[in-house]
């Protein structure tokens, strides 16, 4: 059964604008979140390894601070980052207000405690005899760290997934520092999937909001599938 041309024409005429709009939002969302998570992972993993390996005064306090940061209110993070990049802030000269760079900073701050906390739990669960064996074979500290990462890779991948999930699903902080801006032709400047869903729902465009919501769910599921794949190999610490 085929649809009448009179039915298809309005849909086809409207689709190119909608597709450009949706595609640009997907691009901004992925760009901001993936860059933030990549930077956060490079920053967080050495800290998790250090805290997991070393015994020092204040370790319990530091761990508590990390765990508290995992639930830190996102709007407060947005306000802090907005102040930092505003004209009165220390980064005011860089003119980062309502830019993707400011959004990356916000998501970095939100994701970092999550990645550190989950990675720390994974690293701490690696048995001490595995580290001792690496040292006994003449391994350096770097070698031991690499062995530990290999054994804890499933937990570390889960940490990255958790950080990505918090970053890409964030609304409050990215709305504050990014401004939810789109150009006149519908191309996203700082509009992400979550802020677009909020805006479309408020304007009564529920079809577009549902499409964006479905895309967001698919992206999260794809990342989750990658994590499962990384942790499915034999020898992963699970």
Image: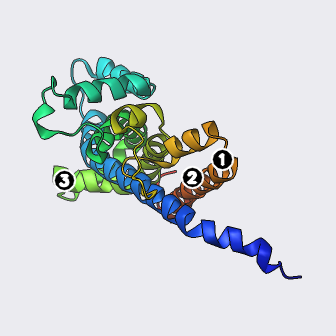
Query: What is the x, y in percent for residue 129?
Result: 35, 46
Mark 2–mark 3 CB contact (< 8 Å)? no
Q: Quadrant of residue 19?
A: bottom right
Give me the residue at 50% from left, 41% from top.
Answer: 195
Query: What is the x, y in percent for residue 233?
Result: 51, 66
- Mark 3 lies on a secondary structure that is helix
The residue carrying mark 1 is: 205
The residue carrying mark 3 is: 142
Give the label on residue 216, or none.
2
Res 91 visible: no
Of the numbered discs 1 and 2, the one sitting upstream in the chain is 1
> CA–CA distance between discs 1 and 2?
17 Å
Mark 1–mark 2 CB contact (< 8 Å)? no
- Mark 1 lies on a secondary structure that is loop
Query: Which of the colour schemes (rainbow, by chain, secondary structure, one colour) is used?
Result: rainbow
Give the label on residue 163, or none.
none
> CA–CA distance between discs 2 and 3?
38 Å
> CA–CA distance between discs 1 and 3?
53 Å
Q: In front here: 114 or 19? A: 19
**Nearer the camera: disc 1 or disc 2:** 1
Q: Residues within 10 Å of mark 3 (few under 14, many from 20)?
A: few
């Amino acid at each position: 059964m085929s649809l009448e041309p009179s039915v298809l024409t309005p849909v086809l005429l409207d689709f190119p604008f909608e597709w450009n709009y949706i595609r640009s939002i997907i691009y901004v969302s992925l760009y901001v979140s993936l860059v933030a998570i990549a930077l956060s992972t490079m920053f967080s993993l050495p800290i998790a390894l250090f805290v997991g390996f070393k015994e020092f005064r204040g370790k319990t306090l530091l761990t508590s601070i990390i765990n508290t940061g995992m639930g830190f209110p996102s709007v407060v993070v947005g306000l802090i980052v907005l102040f930092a990049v505003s004209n009165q802030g220390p980064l005011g000269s860089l003119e980062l207000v309502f830019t993707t760079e400011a959004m990356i900073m916000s998501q970095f701050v939100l994701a970092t405690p999550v990645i550190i906390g989950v990675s720390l739990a994974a690293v701490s669960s690696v048995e001490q005899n595995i580290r001792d064996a690496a040292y006994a074979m003449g391994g350096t500290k770097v070698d031991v760290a690499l062995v530990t990462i290999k054994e804890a890779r499933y937990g570390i991948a889960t940490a990255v997934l958790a950080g990505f999930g918090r970053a890409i699903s964030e609304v409050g902080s990215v709305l504050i520092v990014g401004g939810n801006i789109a150009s006149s032709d519908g191309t996203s400047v700082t509009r992400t999937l979550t802020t677009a869903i909020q805006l479309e729902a408020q304007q009564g465009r529920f079809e577009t909001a549902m499409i964006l919501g479905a895309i967001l769910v698919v992206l999260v599921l794809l990342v989750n599938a990658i994590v499962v794949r990384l942790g499915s190999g034999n020898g992963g610490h699970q």
